[in-house]
Image (cartoon, rainbow, N blue to C red):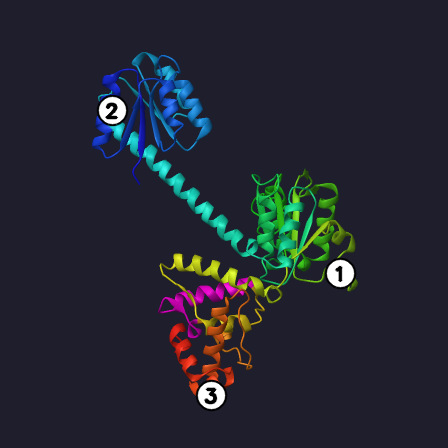
Amino acid sequence: MKFKILIVDDEKNIRDGLAESLEMEGYDVVTASDGDAAYKRYQKGDIDLVITDLRMPGMSGEELLKRVKAETPGVAVVVLTGHGTVRDAVQAMKDGAWDFLTKPIQDLDRLNIIVQRALSNRERRIKNQEIEEELEKRKQSEIIIGSNAAMRHVMEAIGRAAPTRASILITGESGVGKELVADAIHRLSPRKDKPFVKVHCAALAESLLESELFGHEKGSFTGATGRRRGKFELANEGTLFLDEIGEIDQNIQIKLLRVLQERKFERVGGEETIEVDIRLVAATNRDLKAEIETGRFREDLYYRLNVVTISVPPLRERKQDLHLLINSFLKTFSTENNKEINGIDAKALAKLNSYNWPGNVRELRNCIESAVVMTKGPMIIEEDLPPTIHSVIDDGWIRIPCGSSLEKAEEIVIRETLSSQKGNKSETARILNIGRKTLHRKIEDYGVE
């Protein structure tokens, strides 16, 4: 990318000399003779670096620095100062300046090094921001995409509950996107700029989970070589997400209940009482009411966790969203794998629609990623699908994706009927109750093989 530099100095020979030097290095350069003109130019946008004198008529360089850093912290400012005002330059560094140069500027190599470093830092920040935005889009893609009534209800519930302090219990089968719901709740809450800490409860043994949640003191058990802060401490003022909450032991349940009631706890092996302010979001694929009946889950903890319940439907109950999700995943994985995939052919789509998706959105995501990697052409075909999808038994039904146009529906019917008759056009025309010539024309129009 080509960077644009704004040079500000009331001495024409200095600003023109700097501009000429930096233009020779390949930068775009604009100049201003005072702080007021520089600020007006800066407000137009597209400036990546400001080089400004400190002492100027009108708006000073110090004021220009403060305004630039307040409005766009990612834009670096290099200040110019005379030998007698180095103290001012040091103060400018404290106010956020990237570096300073003393006038007259004779060491052009030092100037170029300062400019290169400042602009490299800006480029990294821009790329990091782009990556964060892309990750944010990908986080949202699986849960925000959804048009059926159940998913609309989920999104409405997120919007209402997120701004509150209430504990939230997210329920649903494995792979439906419970963690994504938790992510959305945190992002839409007043705690969005505070920590979002996740714990997968089923992945840890009881002794390890207690230390993971509450921390431990040095020597509290074998292997505890030092003090460790737990997830509750790390999530202070933010959100703590406990995934698979139904898997935790009764002893941990008691301690968890106390934290939710009193907002305080002690580390394992410790005596100091630690107070925390956290928003708890939990998730489970178990029926916690049934677990209460069997005595495996505490009823009092259940009601502490379950102030608000958000139930995420399985994919088989939201087949209307299948094509929206497929298109989103196709776009994502085509870009990641540097492939140009135009879509999925009718037979492959029929297989995807016929499948029951026991692994839900997670399984669909994996399926589309695999198909994108395996396909040899611009269209994903039936043979590109994973074996579990490809082996779905043909039960004699023709499945037409919801939302298909009439032309697409007709193409699928002709293609599938022709396939079922092993290419016999006469029999296909008879079954479809159309003339053989009409069938030939439609086969040619749709490109049916």
Residue at image x 49%, y 64%? 366
Find out whether the residues at labels 2 and 1 contact each other: C-beta distance under 8 Å. Answer: no
Gap between marks 2 and 3 measured at Cα? 82 Å
- The spot of residue 139 in percent (x, y) is 52, 52
**Badge 2 element:** helix
| Quarter of the picture holding the C terminus | bottom left
* Type of amino acid under label 2: Leu
326 inside magenta stretch: no
Residue at image x 45%, y 63%? 369
Which residue, given by chain and number where applicable, does mark 1 sit on? 289
Name the side, left or right, on which 36 lies relative to 429. Answer: left
Label 2 or label 1, whichever comes before in sequence order: 2
> Which span of residues is magenta-colored?
361-384
Residue at image x 64%, y 50%? 156
Which disc is residue 326 wearing?
none
* Type of amino acid under label 1: Lys
Displayed quadrant of residue 72: top left
* Type of amino acid under label 3: Glu
- The spot of residue 90 in percent (x, y) is 39, 19
Label 2 or label 3, whichever comes before in sequence order: 2
**Badge 1 element:** helix
- The spot of residue 289 in percent (x, y) is 75, 60
Label 1 or label 3, whichever comes before in sequence order: 1
378 inside magenta stretch: yes
Residue at image x 27%, y 17%? 103
Q: Vertically, is 325 above or below 430?
A: above
Dot 3, crowdedness within 10 Å: few (<14), some or many (≥20)? Answer: some
Which residue, given by chain and number where applicable, does mark 3 sit on? 427
Q: Nearest the camera: 299 or 380?
A: 380
